[in-house]
Image (spheres, helix red, strand yellow):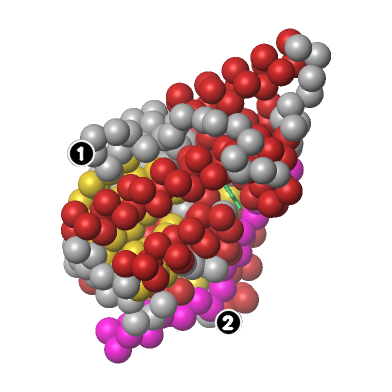
Amino acid sequence: MYILGIESSCDETSAAVVSMNENGERRILSNIVASQIEIHRLYGGVVPEIASRAHIEAISNVTNEALSEAGVSLLDIGCVAVTSHPGLIGALLVGVNFAKSLAFSNKIPLVAVNHVKAHVAAAYLEDPALEPPFLALVVSGGHTSIYSVENYTDFCEIGATRDDAAGEAFDKIGRVIGMPYPAGAAMDKLAYEGDAKAIKLPSPALLGDTLDFSFSGLKTAALNYINSERQKGNEPNAADLTASYTATIVDAIVKKIDASISKTGAKTLVLAGGVAANSHIRKALDTLCEKRNVKFCKPRLSLCSDNAAMVAAAGYFEYLKGNFADTSLNASASDDGN
Ligand code: KG4
Ligand code: ZN
C-alpha cells in the first residue's frame, strides 16, 4: 500500500510516498523536504508566523514533487498520514488542512500522526526487520524522551526532560558562541577540536531513581562560564567549551539509557530525532549497546531530522489499527502522548 505522508510541524515542509505492506515491505519511494532554515537563520531561531506562511507557499509543490518522484498519482494512494501534534500550531494547521482537503476530496482514508512517534517510526524504514517491543530515545529541538515502545502504536514514556530539550541546549550555547541557527551540526564538528575535560559542567542526568533529564542548569552554567570569561576580557575557547558541553550531554544520555536498559530488560534501542544525527551520541550509544548486548538501530541522518517518510511510516500502523481521522481533525500544539 502507498502512504502519502505530510509534515509541517516546525520549519520543514515535507511530503513523502512510502510503500508498506503486511509482508514486511517498508520502502521509501520519495521523501521531499523543503527547509526554511535559511529564512529563520536571520532571526536566530524559528519565527512561528513566518514558518506558517512558508509552509503555505511550499506544501502544494512539495506534495506534487513527492508524488511525481515516486511515480504515482493520488489514485494510487491508500492512505494520507499527516502530523497533527505536537508542534507550532500555525505550522501544523497548514499540513492538517491541506491533508484533509486532499484526503476527503479524493476519498482517501486519513490518519493523524504524533510527530514524536513519527521520529521513532523512522527506524522501521531504516531496518525493515525491526519490531516492537524496544526502547527508544527521542532527542530533537523540542523533545528529549525515553520510551518503552510496547507495540507499533502504543508508547510508554519512562523518562523525559523536565525543562529544555537537548537540541535547544545545543542551539542556545552555539548561538552565544557565534554559530548560526541551528547550531547542532556545527557543534558536533567543533567538539572534535577541543578538550572534553577542559570545563567542568553540571550533568543534565537527574540524580536518584529517575530516568529524567534537566538541561537548564547545564545551559546556565555554560552561559555563566562564557560571561565570566568575557568579563575578564577573554574570549572563551569555543572548541574546549563545545567539547566539554557535548561530553556532558553524551555522558548523561549514556547513563540514563544504561539505566533504562536495566529497568526494562530491552534487547533493542532505537535512536530518533534531529539530535540523533550527533556523531558523539551515536558513537557512545554504539559502545553502550555493544557492552550491554543490545541491538542498536540508528536511522540515517536524512531520516533523523524532520521528514514526511517517518510520518507515512507511523501513519501506516495507525491505519492498520483503524485509527482514522474525520473532517473534525484539528491540530494541537501539545503532546497528549497519543
Ligand atoms: O527533529 P528536528 O529536525 O526538529 C524538531 O522536531 O525539533 O531537530 C532539530 C534539532 C536542532 O536543535 C538541531 O540543532 C539539532 O536537531 N541537530 C543536532 C545535529 N544535527 C541537528 N544536534 C546535535 N548534533 C547534530 N549533529
Ligand atoms: Zn522533529
Instruction: Tell me residue 229's x, y (percent).
Output: 71, 18
Disc on the earlier residue, 2 or 1: 2
Q: Residues within 10 Å of mark 1 (few under 14, many from 20)?
A: few
The residue to which callout 2 is attached is: 71
The residue to which callout 1 is attached is: 209
* Magenta span of residues: 19-40
36 is within the stretch colored magenta: yes
26 is within the stretch colored magenta: yes
Residue type pointed to by label 2: Gly
Instruction: Tell me residue 62's x, y (percent).
Output: 61, 60
* 138 versus 248 height, above or below: below
- Residue 271 location, quadrant: bottom left
* 267 versus 225 height, above or below: below
Residue sitting at x 66%, y 47%:
191
Q: Of all residues shown, which one is farthest toward the top?
A: 231
Residue sitting at x 52%, y 62%:
283
Label 2 C-beta lies within 8 Å of the nearest ligand 1 atom: no
Residue 80 is at least partly visible in this image: no
